[in-house]
Image (cartoon, grey):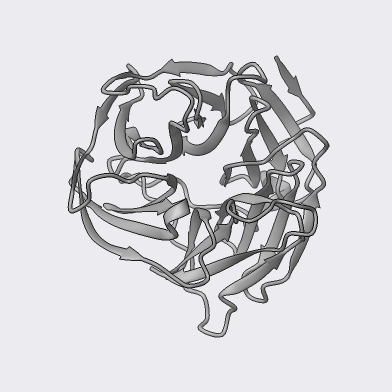
Amino acid sequence: MTRNHPMPSRRSVLGGAFVAALATATGAEAVSAAPAAAWPTEFPLPDGFLPEGITIGRRPYAYMGSRANGAIHRTDLRTGTGGIIHEGAAGSAAIGLKLDRDGLLYVAGGGGGTARTIDARTGSLVATHQLSAPTGHFINDVAFLGDRAWFTDSRDAVLHGVPRGRGGGVRRLPLTGDWVQTPDANNANGIVTTPDGRGLILVKSTPGELHHVNLTTGHATRIALSGADTVVNGDGLVRIGRTLYVVQNRLNLISVFDLDAGARTARLRRTITDPRFDVPTTAARYGDRLYLVNARFTTPQTPETTFNGVAVPL
């Protein structure tokens, strides 16, 4: 079921404020202006926020989602300060999220099986799509390709394509080919486009694989790794050209791979670690930095638990 709230045309309202560059021929994310060296590399989040997802558009604002109640927090990267723009609700969650070129946030709803669209300017809910039953599924992350936002389900071998705009229904795309679902484990997690902008790359957290997915057929081809046996605990993905950054949450590191042109092989170039990492889950690029949120999965998740985000050089 889809609950649609009024969606006025907002290009005239937003102007250039939240407009991100359209996808290029290579499918690479938009390049933002490099942040000043004086900008902070750590920023606080509310106690008990339980962050997991982060997204950044053309302007220096990071949006982060809460596993606690689906709230959305916005941080000014220039100052490290911010606040809640969407309050969320009991029983809701905001896992992965992406900011679209028109200022709409597409938010994965985790165990609730939903995909929500939220106005990043006002924080108001625009639409809710019920992608799956609220049990036995976990809607985890999202990427844009073509006219849809594609959501992963960590508990089901399927992708969900939500229309980016007014019309059309949700497309359900079963994963086939090399994809083998691991029972009672996190499977599909992070998702990005391929360098040619025609397909998608998924990270399978358990046992730690990368897959190239054909959007016409759903056929998944396992990407051959070189220099690493697995990407176990793979979570968020960031791709810049043919460089793929894989956040491996409980390992407290980011593995940096060079992809071939067809995204069939991935060669480990280096890893990024930082003493401030405390189970980072997802990342977003702004300028010459990656910004990450620390989910702190190995720390008691209480209303008093402190959380933060950190930035590291690319």
Residue 273 in the image: x percent, y percent? 40, 67
Placement of 275 over or under 130, stated as above or below: below
Give the left or right position of residue 292, taking residue 26 as reference.
Answer: right
Q: Residue at x 37, y 19 (%)?
A: 175
Give the left or right position of residue 147, taking residue 267 as reference.
Answer: right
Residue 45 in the image: x percent, y percent? 71, 63
Residue 121 in the image: x percent, y percent? 74, 51
Q: Residue at x 31, y 63 (%)?
A: 271
Q: Residue furthest bottom?
A: 38
Residue 40 in the image: x percent, y percent? 59, 78
**So how many labels did they put on this image?**
0
Placement of 113 over or under 285, stated as above or below: above
Placement of 206 over or under 2, stated as above or below: below
**Quadrant housing the C terminus:** bottom left
Q: Quadrant of residue 58?
A: bottom right
134 vs 84, nearest the viewer? 134
Q: Residue at x 60, y 64 (%)?
A: 309
